[in-house]
Image (cartoon, grey):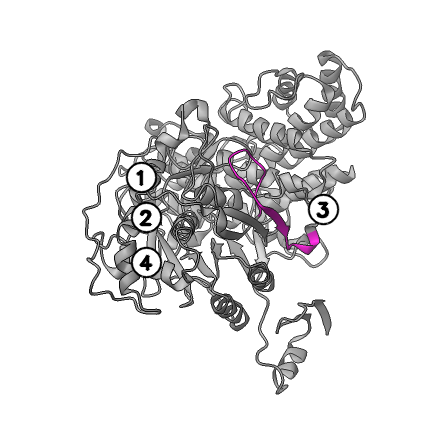
Amino acid sequence: MEVVETTGNRNYVVLSMTEEEAAELAQDECVVSVERDVIVRAMSETGGNGDLDATVHLEDLVKAQEYEWNLAAIHATPDELMAYATDESVVRVAVLDSGMSVCEDLDVAEYVNLVSTEQDTIVYNQDATGHGTAVAGLLAGNIDDEGIIGVAPDVTMYSVRVFDLTNEAPISRIIGGIYWAIDHDIHIINMSFGTDVNSYALHQAVQAAAEADILMVAAAGNGICVEYPAAYPEVVAVGATNYQGARADFSPTGDALELVAPGECVLTDSFYGGVTALNGTSLAAPQVAGAAAVLWAKDMSKSSDFIRQLLNASANGSLGTETEYGNGLLDVRRAFEIYDAFEESYVPGVFEYAGIAENLAPYVAGDEPGYVVGSWLHNEHAGSINQGSGISSTVYPTKYLTLMIKTSDYVDGEYGFQAGIIPHLHGGKNFGSSSQRKTTNYVNHVVFLYEVTRELRKNKGKSLTVAQQKQIVSDVAERMKKVEVDSELVDKVKDLIAVNNIKGVDDITDQTSVDSNIYKVLGAALHLAGDVYAHRSMVPTSLVTNAVEEEVDNPITGSYINKNHFKSGVACSLKKVEEKTYNSLDDNDAEKCGHKYWECFALGVEKGMMEFKDIRRFTIEAKKYARQYEDNPLFYKSRYSIGTNYTVNFILKSFANNTALNEELFLPGVYSGKSYGIRLNALKMLYEELGWKLKAGENWSTYSTLVVR
């Protein structure tokens, strides 16, 4: 038994021990409970149900605040609140999350990092995933022309980082964050995360915060049931609505739900500049926390229970049932309007007030948002790349992290670098006949891009011409000729070397310098590594066996497929499935028979020959519907949350240490201890070409098709 973490005068301790030791300790009469320190994940909100970038640049929207439909929906626009002007700076709010990036749109009183293994993370790059920054923007974005406006722009906000670079935290760290808030006289805690594990120790911490008169607001979850800590009676559980006032599809239902707030396709701050459109109850919760702050600022002598009951009494209950909407939609203006009458009627702990007229005002929907939630194409690449901020601030200073992220965007959005033109940068391509299919070695291509960065790095700070740098690219390709690097990719890397107009990196004066090109090429390598999981993963049979038939425009946010996204006509035989899948034949080239498109697709999945990128061959509108599967990090999300994050992190650490890549590159299930069994197409064969092997005792069938499919 080993002490992992002590907690001072608190009544819990984190230990490392065997099952037998845990059972023995549980019998000790001085021990209240022994429980696993389970992992909690911050709720991911990025979706893939649209065609626009996840990051919405201000120059495209002109002024982001004009698109914040959420503030109008809850009657919390600056103009509406001006009549009730309060100084919310007297209210202290702790945001327990992934940290916050330093940006002009957010004023942070203090940055607290409770991730003991990542204490060297510099403040301005603390948020590796963007989750905490997005949450903070909706709570307290400044009233300026730089980004979005939060509900409580002047609140005294504390960034309490509990999530690591992979958006994970043990429950013990969440508990530590709550006790930090108690010790520092925090008034409101925002918790945009959840777990289905009912932890005795977590509930004790929540009860302690309630006794300290702290108002706790938590996201209800993005699933079927309200999760913990939102499900605890001491916490305000917040669900999500869309711009029409309807419950968002991902918002849970149940008796534990207390309030709802906008959480589908809302704008908030992006952690690397600009604003971003996101989904999730994680975005709804901070709006309630912000509302509580502006109301509490009116009279700080009031209790947290008073503010909580005021929020409930003023909520708009006209939208639907309590099971779906709790007490209703947050209505800040209404809360101020009934404040005095409520003050006279208030009884601690009482939810029903006969003297307060119920808010049943008809919901008036605004215009449909002029933007959509983005896909894996941008936001998720950015999130994984930004892990570099916690690895080394010397190797990955802010301006070069930005350049890497912008380069990743560039190869997705710039004609000539897109997947249809140069698939080698987007997971590689299959080719050959239906009887003898081949694939480019996407593993070797990641290694090639990485080795170019290492070779350029030898000339860091030197003055080399573009031609000289292009020659370095050729030399690396020649050196790696044991496994041939595709000539098209070599040429494209040379083109990237010469690019001098990547949007969003104006502070780097010469983008064709050696230093800049190191990070441009590294950004391309990280993009390709992430796209391997998005596109080259094999579709598991469970996605087909769990298929449903829903409305076509219902967004996909789980591990199932909507059959209605598939073409309805007849399609082809198994032989033609193979050809259609890998050679991209036109529809009129398919042999007509009794198989419909869904049946053909399901048959291909059953035979183990479908990659995620093949789904587009069978859908109604490939760009619109296939992207919900291929580029949606909420669909079969371990591809991103485990696969991409692991591989990108491995590359970033290897580069920081200036070491070569090896067989750990695409095997998180083997080398990280993560539970990850999605197979990549032909990974075994591609590894063998490089002379890479599995750990002794591992089985390739879990991680790879044995032939090119």
Identify which residue is drawn at 60% across, 20% down: 506
> Residue at label 4?
310
Quarter of the figure with residue 66: top left
> Residue at label 1?
80
Of residue 331 and residue 526, the one placed in the foreground of this image is: 331
Comparing marks 3 and 2, which lies closer to the viewer?
Answer: 2
Q: Range of the magenta residues? A: 99-117
How would you rate the neighbour count of disc 3 (Cα within 10 Å): few for under 14, some for 14-19, many for 20 or more? some
Tag 2, which secondary structure?
helix
Q: What residue type is labelled 2?
A: Val
- Residue 292 is at least partly visible in this image: yes
> Residue at label 3?
120
Could you tell me if the residues under marks 1 and 2 are in contact, i.e. CB atoms within 8 Å?
Answer: yes
Q: Which of marks 4 and 2 is nearer the N terminus?
A: 4
Q: What residue type is labelled 1?
A: Glu
Q: Which of marks 4 and 3 is nearer the N terminus?
A: 3
Of residue 212 and residue 459, the one placed in the foreground of this image is: 212
Q: Image check: 92 left or right of 15?
A: left
**3D distance between C-alphas at marks 1 and 4:** 18 Å
Q: What residue type is labelled 4?
A: Leu
**3D distance between C-alphas at marks 3 and 1:** 43 Å
* Above/below status of 159 relative to 310: above
Tag 3, which secondary structure?
loop
**3D distance between C-alphas at marks 4 and 3:** 42 Å
**3D distance between C-alphas at marks 3 and 2:** 40 Å
Could you tell me if the residues under marks 3 and 2 are in contact, i.e. CB atoms within 8 Å?
Answer: no
Residue 496 position within the rendered picture, expressed as x and y whole percent measured from the top left: 62, 20
Q: What residue type is labelled 3?
A: Asp
Per the rendering, the mark at residue 332 is 2
Tag 4, which secondary structure?
helix
